[in-house]
Image (tube, rainbow, N blue to C red):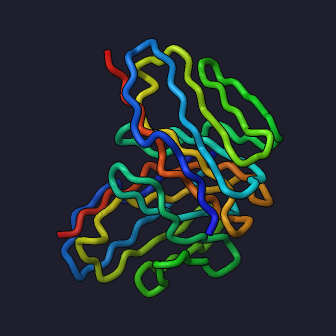
Amino acid sequence: SAVISQKPSRDICQRGTSLTIQCQVDSQVTMMFWYRQQPGQSLTLIATANQGSEATYESGFVIDKFPISRPNLTFSTLTVSNMSPEDSSIYLCSVGYGTGGRYEQYFGPGTRLTVT
Amino acid sequence: GQQVMQIPQYQHVQEGEDFTTYCNSSTTLSNIQWYKQRPGGHPVFLIQLVKSGEVKKQKRLTFQFGEAKKNSSLHITATQTTDVGTYFCAGPGDRDDKIIFGKGTRLHILP
């Protein structure tokens, strides 16, 4: 497993602004993921941010709105750009251990974003 | 696309009663995973099942993977207040590096 931290833990932002969320892992890991979770709902994958390749975005999520950086094996950032109230959600990073679709995911504590 | 269906969506049980949540897929799964999310917390990995008909136990929790590898269940014996939370199953997505989560079953324990 891994110890994962996220910054900030929560924020309240004005619409039209951008917020960058940081995810730090205590060990090197190739697979890293960014999810969004509305309160009481399931997890929606935003993108896969494997080190050494461009992030792969899921349907409904685009790089201009959610740019991701993955500069090394222990760190990633997700930016929520030009925010609107619909972006209010919990954003979670996770890391994966394993191969071939059989991997375990470990999640950070999440960032609770409120856009006013 | 790939998806895993989870039932029930909510379950209220008296403390001490048993609880079961079910996960179903229309396609054969190479593996199934289970996660628990406490209220206000983040999902925590519980277990991964890989083999047809596999049964694994963790104290009061019993996990099963169907013979056809299209369904799975999580059974909790004699629930306790610490079992409160949402239980998610997750299966492989349409890429090797992708996992699809079910909608989860929220367990509420009545004292």
Q: Is residue B51 visible?
A: yes
Q: Quadrant of the C terminus of chain B?
A: top left
Quadrant of residue A47 within the rendered picture? bottom right
Q: Is residue A60 above or below residue B22?
A: below
Which residue occupies the foreground of this view, B99 or B9?
Answer: B9
Q: Is residue A95 above or below residue A83?
A: above
Residue drawn at x 61%, y 24% is B61
- Residue A111 in picture, x, y percent from top left: 37, 57
Quadrant of residue B57 within the rendered picture? top right
The answer to whether residue A16 is left or right of residue B90 is left
Q: Quadrant of the N terminus of chain B?
A: bottom right
The answer to whether residue A76 is left or right of residue B85 is right
- Residue A92 in picture, x, y percent from top left: 46, 58
Residue drawn at x 59%, y 18% is B60
Task: Farthest residue to the bottom: give it.
Answer: A64
Q: Is residue A69 above or below residue B54?
A: below
Q: Is residue A28 visible?
A: no
